[in-house]
Amino acid sequence: IRKLARLSEAAVGNEAPAGSIVTAVEGATVNLPLADVIDVAVEKTRLTKTLGKLEKEIGGLSAKLSNEKFLAKAPEDVVEEQKERLAAAQAEKAKLEAAVGRLAAMG
């Protein structure tokens, strides 16, 4: 990854470095320390927009899963898939909210 991205350093850890942007991907969160390289306001706007889309998706999935008619008529595998999508969206939302918080601390 270092060679492809032309990075001088890459590390695996549980905490994002100060001044980093965050991209949530399935199974991981990628942090790039760019405090002096990016426009913090633009990045906050991007993450906020993504959060809005996720909240809309979470709302739709929650409504579907609380609908008794859907639960009664849908095959069990479809219901389970919707539950998994909801859980994944909620996890991604939490990661993005943390990223927005870190950006807010940057300035």
Image (cartoon, grey):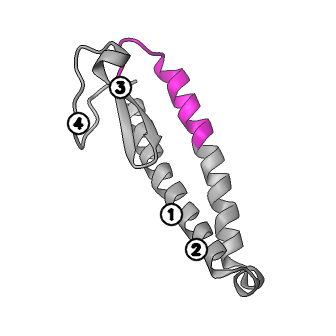
Taking the magenta stretch, the answer to whether it contains residue 15 is: no
In the drawing, what numbered circle is on residue 87?
A: 1
What residue appears at the point 59 percent right and 68 percent down from the top-left corner? 81
Q: Examine the rendered structure and indicate whether residue 22 appears above or below residue 74.
A: above
Q: Is the magenta region chiefly helix, strand or loop?
A: helix
SS under mark 1 = helix
Between 72 and 49, which is closer to the camera in this rendering?
A: 72
Q: Is residue 2 left or right of residue 25?
A: left
Q: Examine the rendered structure and indicate whether residue 42 appears above or below residue 75.
A: above
Check whether the beta carbons of the residues at disc 1 and disc 4 lie within 8 A of each other. no
In the drawing, what numbered circle is on residue 12?
A: 4
Give the extent of the magenta segment.
33-50
SS under mark 4 = loop
In the drawing, what numbered circle is on residue 80?
A: 2
Q: Which residue is mark 3?
A: 32
Q: Who comes first in sequence, dot 1 or dot 4?
A: 4
